[in-house]
């Protein structure tokens, strides 16, 4: 018994109630307690059974002592009531008189012990108290163990992780609610089954073999495993499986604690897609300048050749083929830049309906007469901030894609509408923020897209067409333009039932600019003086030759420093400077800034074959009104020059 106080010292004090009318009896017991367990026991005196029952019901106690005398029914009544209301509270009768009948009655009433005292009452009482302390400590330990078990059960049941327990053969004995929610199987459907019910064709057999080899060897398996839900959907688990051992160290069960990372996998795939796009974009931006300058030289001299050849000349057809190839190469460069979101933009606040109406006039020539083209404009359409040329690129690429999906003819529908995306939509497409959008939908009645191709259709150079029939940049271009404009694109398709592309562009709420269609392919003449600054000699020479042919006086400079010198030496009026943006020593933006102080009336037109990021890094440039992206045709240059020079004339003629 020497160990008893030591064990009890780690538990709260034992709270003892002593029911007796005799103050001396209470004092005697209190003295005994103070000698044997003052720090372990707190004893309280109650004078009546009624007071004792009220006290037990209100606050409880760990041990109840009751003084008993012959003919006293109160003690027995206390025992009965205590048994009915607080059966876990131990009761000990204390008496100087031994009566077999009374003892039997007390035992029948569930009193724990009867103490009689001829000479050894103190010793027996001490043993009883120590026994009660030991019983109390054990009950407290059991209560703590039970409470911890309940906590563990609630933790497993309410855990967001997928927890399951299997026997050594892999048969499921338990699966928590999270496992039910994610897998779609109820616990009753899983218990008695193996994890084979979740087996997915995407996962290699080697993964499952590695898992079993690891856990049967007594080690913990960690890995990402693809699984299949009850409805057939694939989901991914970050899986941890550990063996459970018995007291002898033998493996009896396995516990699987998994985390659903399906959404994370989707985000990782989107990140990888973005990284691919960025890598191709950097490649495109790096080669764009040199490639575009080469195309400028080829297309410029081809244009000059075409202008000198009669329609019946045998070489005219060859020159036209060269020009067509140049345009296709230029389109390829623009597609790469659009895909990488580095294409220069002339942003306007637009109503898409008139823009698309104008584009739809050209689409029949692209898709052919056997395809019925329908435009359904939305009423009270919201406004978007976009480049009309890029909207044209989107529709042309989607129309070309639809045409190839309908080799025997069909229907192509272009629709617009204003939409507001709420939380319900966002839950299905978590990457799209809620808000107001303008929806551009393009639907064809063609062959549809096979499920295995759907994840890859926006990747650069991915195509299902025969070799030589496509570059694989059409949909990548659309994707890049939509993203560059802060929008989102979704595809809905089933084999044999057609395809719908839905493009969501954010609405804006300020004024709308009037859309002006691209002018015809003409070369308006002029007679003004032009300062041409270009570091690529072939580009500079072909451009100068063309400008002189249509009436302009051209001052030619190889770089910014030479342009400054020529401008300062030239006494006449220079109406317009055409300058490349990126040049050695001094770029076009810095050159324009210096000449603005010396020739404030001179207009400036910037040109470049570099991507947007590189151009804007060289200074503030108005890419909407004063910029041409290489490669451009000489006729496009002539129209842009005329537009700027006419504004200068109009500004000079207006009253001040």
Image (spheres, grey):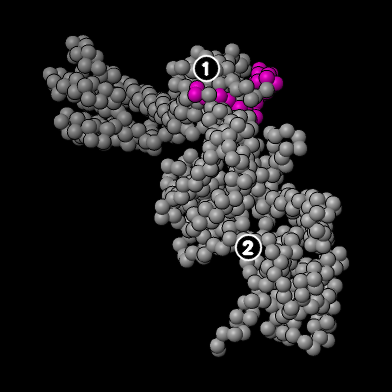
Magenta span: 205-231
Q: Secondary structure at mark 2?
A: loop
Query: Residue at the spot x=60%, y=22% of the render?
Result: 200
Q: Which mark is residue 519?
A: 2
Residue 419 location (% of width, % of height) = 44, 49
Residue 649 location (% of width, % of height) = 63, 81
Q: In front: 95, or 550?
A: 550
Residue 35 location (% of width, % of height) = 37, 34
Asked if the residues shown at circle 2 and circle 1 are in contact, with their CB atoms under 8 angstroms apart, the answer is: no
- Magenta span includes 471: no
Query: Residue at the spot x=58%, y=60% of the render?
Result: 517
Q: Which residue is mark 1?
A: 172
- Decide: is 505 above or below 256: below
Residue 398 location (% of width, % of height) = 60, 44
Q: In front: 560, or 527?
A: 527
Q: Quadrant of the C terminus?
A: bottom right
């Amino acid at each position: 018994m020497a160990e008893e106080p030591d064990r009890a010292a780690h538990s709260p004090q034992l709270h003892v109630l002593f029911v007796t009318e005799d103050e001396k009896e209470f004092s005697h017991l209190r003295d005994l307690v103070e000698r044997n367990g003052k720090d372990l026991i707190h004893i309280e005196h109650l004078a009546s059974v009624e007071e004792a029952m009220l006290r037990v019901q209100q606050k409880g106690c760990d041990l109840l002592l009751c003084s008993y005398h012959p003919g006293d029914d109160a003690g027995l009544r206390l025992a009965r009531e205590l048994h009915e209301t607080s059966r876990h509270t131990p009761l000990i009768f204390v008496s100087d008189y031994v009566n077999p009948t009374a003892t039997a009655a007390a035992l029948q009433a569930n009193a724990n012990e009867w103490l009689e005292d001829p000479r050894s009452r103190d010793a027996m009482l001490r043993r009883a108290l120590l026994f009660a302390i030991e019983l109390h400590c054990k009950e407290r330990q059991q209560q703590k163990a039970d409470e911890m078990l309940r906590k563990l059960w609630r933790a497993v049941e309410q855990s967001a992780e997928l927890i399951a327990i299997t026997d050594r053969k892999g048969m499921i004995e338990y699966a928590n609610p999270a496992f039910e929610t994610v897998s779609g199987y109820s616990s009753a459907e899983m218990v008695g089954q193996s994890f084979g019910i979740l087996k997915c064709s995407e996962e290699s057999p080697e993964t499952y073999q590695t898992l079993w080899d690891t856990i049967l060897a007594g080690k913990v398996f960690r890995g990402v495993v693809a699984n299949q839900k009850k409805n057939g959907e694939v989901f991914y688990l970050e899986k941890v499986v550990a063996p459970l051992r018995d007291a002898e160290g033998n493996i009896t069960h396995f516990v699987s604690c998994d985390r659903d990372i399906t959404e994370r996998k989707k985000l990782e795939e989107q990140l990888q897609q973005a990284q691919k796009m960025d890598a191709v974009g950097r490649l495109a931006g790096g080669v764009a300048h040199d490639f575009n300058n080469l195309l400028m030289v080829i297309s410029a001299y081809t244009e000059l050749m075409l202008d000198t050849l009669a329609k019946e000349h045998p070489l005219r057809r060859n020159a036209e083929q060269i020009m067509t190839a140049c345009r296709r190469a230029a389109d390829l460069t623009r597609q790469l830049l659009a895909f990488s979101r580095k294409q220069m933009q002339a942003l306007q606040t637009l109503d898409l309906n008139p823009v698309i109406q104008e584009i739809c006039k050209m689409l029949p020539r692209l898709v052919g007469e056997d395809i019925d083209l329908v435009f359904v404009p939305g009423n009270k359409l919201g406004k978007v901030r976009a480049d009309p040329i890029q909207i044209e690129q989107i529709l042309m690429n989607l129309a070309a894609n639809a045409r190839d999906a309908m080799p025997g003819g069909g229907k192509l529908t272009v629709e617009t509408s204003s939409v507001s995306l709420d939380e319900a939509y966002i839950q299905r497409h978590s990457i799209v923020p809620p808000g107001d959008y303008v929806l551009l939908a393009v639907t064809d009645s063609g062959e549809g897209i096979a499920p295995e191709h759907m994840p890859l259709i926006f990747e650069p150079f991915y195509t299902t067409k025969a070799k030589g029939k496509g570059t694989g940049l059409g949909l990548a271009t659309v994707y890049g333009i939509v993203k560059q404009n802060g929008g989102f694109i979704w595809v809905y398709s089933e084999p044999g039932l057609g395809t719908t592309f839905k493009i969501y562009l954010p609405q804006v709420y300020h004024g709308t600019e009037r859309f002006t269609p691209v002018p015809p392919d003409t070369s308006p003449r002029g007679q003004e003086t032009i300062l041409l600054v270009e570091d690529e000699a072939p580009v500079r020479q072909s451009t100068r030759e063309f400008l002189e042919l249509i009436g302009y006086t051209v001052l030619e400079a190889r770089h910014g420093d030479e342009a400054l010198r020529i401008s300062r030496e030239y006494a006449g009026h220079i109406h317009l400077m055409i300058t490349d943006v990126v040049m050695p020593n001094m770029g076009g933006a810095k050159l324009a800034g210096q000449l603005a102080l010396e020739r404030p009336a001179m207009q400036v037109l910037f040109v470049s074959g570099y991507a947007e990021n590189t151009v804007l890094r060289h200074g503030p440039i108005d890419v909407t009104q004063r910029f041409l992206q290489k490669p451009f045709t000489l006729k496009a240059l002539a129209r842009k020059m005329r537009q700027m020079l006419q504004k200068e004339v109009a500004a000079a003629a207006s009253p001040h």
